[in-house]
Image (cartoon, coloured by chain):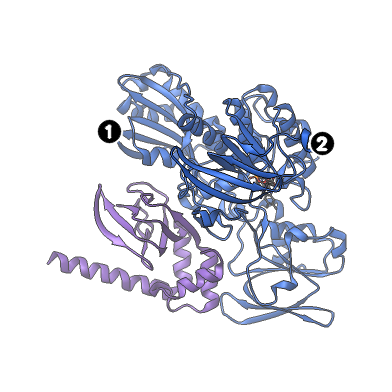
Amino acid sequence: MATRDEIAEALAGMTLFADLTTPQLLGVASQFEEAFFPEGARILRQGLSGSAFYVILDGDASVVVDGTARAQLGRGEFFGEVSILLGEPPTADIVALRPLRCLALPGSAVEAFLVDHPRVLYRMLQSQSRRLRNANRAQS
Amino acid sequence: MADIERPFPPGHYPVIVVGSGPGGLQVSYELSHHGIGHAVLSADPGPGGMFRHWPFFQRLLSWTKPYAPADRRTRAFERWDWNSLIAYEPELRGLQTEFMDGSSDFPSRPEMEASLTAFANRAGIVVRYGCRWESTRREETASGDRFTLVTTDGEYSCEHLILAVGIAEPYTPPSPGVEHAVHYAETRAAETYAGKRLFVIGKQNSGFELASGLLQWASRITLASPSPAKTSIETRSLVGVRARYVQPFEDSALGGGVDILSASLAGITPIPGGLRVDLKRSDTGMPVSLEADEVIAATGFTCPLLDLPELGVATFGQSRLPAQTAFWESATVPGIHFAGTITSGAAGLKKHGIPSYSGAVQGHRYNGRIMVRRLAEQSFGISHEHPPIELASLLDHLLAEATGGPELWHQKAYLASVVTVTPDDGIRDQGILPLTHFLDAGGPDAIAMTIEADGEGAIYPVAYLRRGGKVEEHALEPHPLHDYEGTEYRRHLGALLDLIAPGASAA
Ligand SMILES: Cc1cc2nc3c(=O)[nH]c(=O)nc-3n(C[C@H](O)[C@H](O)[C@H](O)COP(=O)(O)OP(=O)(O)OC[C@H]3O[C@@H](n4cnc5c(N)ncnc54)[C@H](O)[C@@H]3O)c2cc1C
């Protein structure tokens, strides 16, 4: 993965960005930065401030709370938004289970990004709602 | 030059460094300081790397303040000098100040080249110039991998390869008609753009450097890229267009012959008397077209890693930077290390979106030093002293590091000054280490002091306290004059220190 066009193409296939036009996808691809994490690396650290919003391009990551793996994330999934939206440090570590490629947007840019891209905001809300429903189901 | 006079003939060396820019010179100096035998190979005819040619308009975007509040022969001065390489001998420190004619705190390109050349000569750095690395082989041996470099002068082999090859390979993303553009690297003398309508692809520093340099020559300048340009003043960091190059923003805001567009390039087509540039606006998707005489692609540079990706070196991003460990070793091929501007591939925490300054000399000179120290310890059996610190002076030590430690100021939230506290060994100064290493590697009770910025204007010290293997972050208050040695700071940090070194606050 390298060029903006390639990244835009990868984004086009993800639910989160499914409603964007090609110029919008290119805009997103140039606003986000690609990041690579080797197996075992921590992407988010529980309790540490100032983190970013990530979308997984390739690879798998584990959500680890107080040393216990709670969930797994894969291609097209995203993380980091909860702590940014709430203005609090992440409540989990995110650890690469194998080499992980992500796109990252700094926390400070997330609000403006979502306001500029309401369709992404809508998709994110949908995904959050699904997570919430599943969590409720698991509890009941 | 007769081959017989040239240093480092083909053969085996424990360590090979490729590159003679600031990155290569810094690590060669550091390796020699540790007595580690190594060869330095460079395709260039002399020292200086990309500063032999760039910045194109012949002045740096990194400053040196000769009259700063610290003696130029001290570590403290490094905070006020972004350009000199670092050294242990006082007479090799702050060399850039010797090569500035008083016209600007931003040295000219020839002044930077002269200071790097002086460093190489005075430190006795030896380089085999005119030797280009062309391909690589990797062989597994009982004691680890061995790398063979095929060069224009023959074959070299080593156990530890240090690449300081820069990020200066011109890169233009493919798009229709882009062959009618020339890259930043091929920009001609300024006066040859007199009266021309200029279109610049890209809104990063290189694009704005050209735009500001050509304001008095071009008849009209348009810059475009898909997302809006920000200045470093807006981002309150080195992210974005530097203050040196803001004039085009003002001209654009006043409608003064410069236009800055958020649009993607749809095509460049030759037309009678020039080129037609077709764009698509990022916001509305609507087309925009304009005519230009010249199109320059200020679209960045990539890292010339040749065949290393085929040997397993993972790369990422548009510059194809190698993915790295906290100590700047390839994350996927142990034994290959990086120095110079490429070390920006070890991204660190990027807290609040602010990257390390590893892309520039003021950041990567420290990475080079720490990388070699680590290599010396891990592979050459060299141990470093970790001086004891008296309990009574621990607080002073850490607050002085926060207030003046140049590594902390140049590499915010990236490098930290670390002190360990153990029952057996007492309080020890572990020196400057990568912050992510401190956070992730575990270890005894310790404190890592660093400086951070929140991207909204605040700069403040942060103490990471490791207790019973768990790390907690404690931000101290910002200070309007960045002086963290007063009572408030003593009280706050003292209370934290008492948790791992009881009595530290009483000092
Ligand atoms: C246009 C531009 C302007 C910049 N301005 C500044 C500035 O003002 N201040 C600042 O601090 N930073 C600036 N930078 C960043 C700058 O590149 C780094 O700070 C630093 O100079 C890079 O040093 P380096 O040693 O890593 O690489 P370079 O200086 O690029 O040196 C690379 C070396 O590797 C050698 N090499 C490469 N490939 C091979 C090969 N295959 N075989 C043999 N040798 C090879 C080259 O010959 C050269 O000697 C700028 C960058 C650019 C692109």
Q: Is mark 2 within 8 Å of ligand 1?
A: no
The secondary element bearing badge 2 is classed as loop
Q: Position of residue A84 (x, y in %)?
A: 39, 57
Q: Quadrant of residue B251?
A: bottom right
User: Do the CB atoms of the residues marked 1 and 2 lie less than 8 Å apart?
Assistant: no
A136, above or below B49, in the image = below
Q: Can the viewer see residue B474?
A: no
Note whether B160 is above or below B506 in the view shown. below
Q: Judging from the image, what is the letter of the chain drawn in blue? A: B
Q: Which chain is purple?
A: A
Asked whether, in this view, residue B93 is left or right of residue A38, the answer is: right
State which quarter of the image contains the N terminus of chain B.
top right
List x then y, in percent, for residue B95.
72, 30
Q: Closer to the observer: label 1 or label 2?
A: 1
Residue A2 seen in the figure: yes
Residue linked to disc 1 = B468
The residue under the point 33% across, 55% down is: A97
Q: Nearer the viewer, residue B352 or B383?
A: B383
Residue holding disc 2: B101
x and y, in percent, of residue B450 in the image: 47, 36
Q: Give the camera-side residue of B371 and B409.
A: B371
